[in-house]
Amino acid sequence: MRLQIPYGKISGYKVGKILKHFVVDVEANKTAELLNLNRKTVDDYYNLFRKLIYVEQTTAFAKLNGTLEIDESYFGARRVRGLRIKLKRGRGTRKQPVFSIYQRGGRVYTEIVPNCLGTTLQHIIEHIVSENAEVNSDGWRGYDGLVDVGYDNHYRVNHGDNEWSDEHGHHINGIENFWSCTKRRMQKHNGVRKTYFELFLKECEWRYNEEDYEQEAELKKLLNHYIRYNKKGTSLS
């Protein structure tokens, strides 16, 4: 992924203002209007922020432990041009599947997947999840066999039988809340182009992982590191 400081004369103060608007999720066109900047300049910085977040989220990741929730979801338009019917929701849809792991009290990890077959999901789980972790899932057959590969603490809730939690605290409410937040952001932005979807997904992951008051400082740190490394621009205070 190519990272590049946007061209054009713009002060560190203005860059800091753009960053603040990005953090509080102001749309690019509104930010350009409020700061009296060219829309393309703001778009370029927003895209740079998203790329920095993507690199951070995909490289700074250790195996997850503790109590985890795993689930998959599907993203895409409700209709496709040329089809007269709405796309099916959930498993079996033509939409893009995404797999996610949520660590209670910690962070969430997302990955775009070609399908939600057991072999696909198990490969990710073995790479990301410690065998000592407690894993909570729904009854999807893609999660069959986790005990056989060392995940002895695998617990299921059967949504098909209207079971959403049990008396022992086994549920996947946390990861379902993440899906809900992510899809609301997608609707707010009137959808996301397929070419930008992975950046959007990692941005949502980052926003969910970081406390609101930490996001500005964290993004400033990522941007300043990149500026110093490339010896361009003005660092933000």
Image: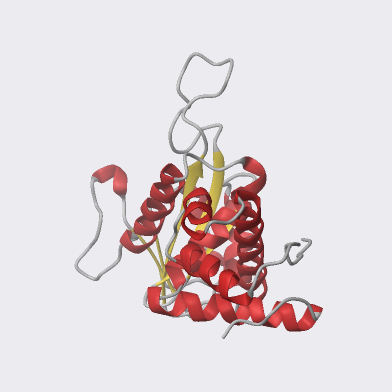
Q: Residue at x 40, y 58 (%)?
A: 178
**Could you say which is closer to the camera, residue 169 or residue 79?**
79
- The N terminus is located in which quarter? bottom right
Query: Does the image show residue 147?
Result: no
Q: Horizontal and vertical percent for residue 135?
A: 43, 68
- Image x and y of residue 2, in percent: 79, 61
Q: Residue 57: where, in percent of width, then height? A: 60, 70
From the viewer's perspective, is residue 201 above or below residue 105? above
Q: Is residue 114 above or below residue 211?
A: above
Number of marks in the image? 0
The front one of 168 and 98 is 98
Horizontal side of 229 relative to 69 (left or right) equals: right
Residue 191 visible somewhere in the drawing: yes
Residue 167 falls in image quadrant: bottom left
Look at 60% across and 44% down and name the residue there.
115
Is residue 176 depicted above or below 160 in this figure?
Answer: below
- 26 vs 104, nearest the viewer: 26
